Amino acid sequence: MIISNRWTQGIAVAVISIIIVFPNRSEAQLSRERVETNPVVEDIFWGTTNVGIGTVQNVSGNNLKSTVMHTFGLVSGGADVFWGLDLGANTRLGLDYGITDKVSVGIGRMTFNKVVDIRSKVNVLRQTESGSVPLDVAVKLSTGISTLSGRGLAFSERLSYLVSLMAAKKFDRLSFQLAPMFARFNRVSAGDQNNLFGLGFLTQYELNERFALSAEYLPVLSDRNLGTEDMMALSLNINTGGHIFQIFFSSSQWHGEQYIMANNSDKFWEGDFRFGFNINRVFGL
Amino acid sequence: MCINSAICRRAAAGLVLSLLIFSGASAQVTSEDIVYYTDSGYAEFASSVPLHSFTGESDHLTGMIDLRENLVDFYLDLNTLETGIGKRDRDMYQTLNTEDHPFAEFTGTLETPFSPDSSGQQVARVRGDFTINGNTREVTIEGTLQPQNGSLILNAGWELRLEDYDIEAPGILFYRVDEVQEIEIEATLNPVDPETLSSE
């Protein structure tokens, strides 16, 4: 019995020695590691433009986004004008192309003043999930060209410009954006301003993966054009997978920040708002 | 430190014998001892619905075939799948619940004989656990393995039923997604020193 115990102890010592000498013979899975260890916060806003104000959201690389934007007459016109729909629409058709995930270029054309606009958006910073970058920051540049005929205008007199710096942050389902912006019109009517400064406020709340509510407000901070008012809009955003629909009420019938600041003459809170909708569709190229 | 010299002698003899056995074994490294590894394999999830077909693709399939332990272990960071439309990618990640379960993974064993010394394409069948969306089911997957210039070329494909893994297909007014996803993987695995692999 004593001999047996001694052999047992000897074998145990030998086995422990082997385990110490050869620790890596046991079966082991690979450790799971994320490819992107510090991902960015996606979909801070669902649309690259909310109603009238551009957002930090950009078109993904090698994607083409088509947009159809409509704004109709004032709802306060009542049933006689089918709550503004009979009064005609200011329609903007647009295409934006993502050169990369952070740089896009676009072109569009709206009914009012037959404006053709060329624009670009660059994401300078992307908010990260870890918080190492707390904000999304983007710059939007846009040039508008009025193509109205019979006005005797030189090409340069038809031009307007916009530069907007957009800073946004998403908290879970709630997003905010501030967008100081500067607009320049080469030629204006007597009494109007060549230069306009504005500050866009945007917010969006995701109700679920399909629906989100958003609001925007664009006060003009500099001397303003006579008879113009700050623009405001409320929108319901619908994600159908293939499309983003934005159904909204807005005080402005214009598209594009510089034209909204220069021309909006309606006060949202006094009932001067109109129905409109945007349709956004993205294609992979 | 030895209490009993007889025990010490026997333990020492056992240790020496063990060392001799293992050193002899390691001196005779054969092709069956090789561990093959990749972190740049291709994986494809295809949804085939008329007018709404799309494919999620990734070049970040990571895995190993350990012929010593007969262990086949692969995983894919699902956030690397791309369909060609950024917004659709992000909607797909939500459907797959990648925030809580970022990986699709398979761990199992090779059931068919495999000879790394043969240059021809060999049918390979593996059985093991496939996990996605935090749900695990035992699966058997067939594919091929082909040794080529010291590496292994892997091809395999199988079907994944979304409901088997509690993945809720988006509603018809959202995306039309096939309840059965066709999965294909392709990878070139290279021999590696097992000590360099980080394991759990």
Image (spheres, grey):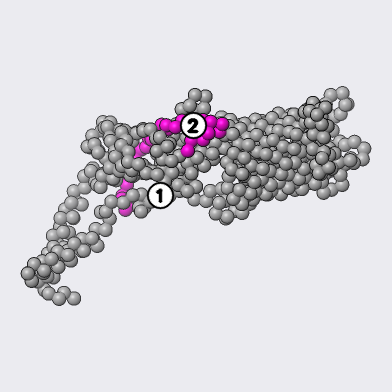
**Residue A218 image offset from top left, x and y in percent:** 77, 45
Q: From this viewpoint, is residue A99 visible?
A: no
Q: Quadrant of the N terminus of chain A?
A: bottom left
Q: Which residues are magenta?
A: B168-196
Neighbours of disc 1 within 10 Å: few (<14), some (14-19), many (20+)? some
Question: Is B177 part of what is drawn in magenta?
Answer: yes
**Residue drawn at x 76%, y 38% as measured from the top left:** A250
Amino acid type, mark 2: Val
Residue lying furthest right? A190
Horizontal relation, residue B97 to residue A164: left or right: left
Q: Chain of mark 2?
A: B
From the viewer's side, name the closer residue of A142 and B164.
Answer: B164
Mark 1 secondary-structure assignment: loop
The image shows residue A248 at horizontal and vertical percentages of 72, 37
- Name the residue beneath numbered marker 1: A32
* Residue behind mark 2: B177
User: Is disc 1 in the same subunit as disc 2?
Assistant: no
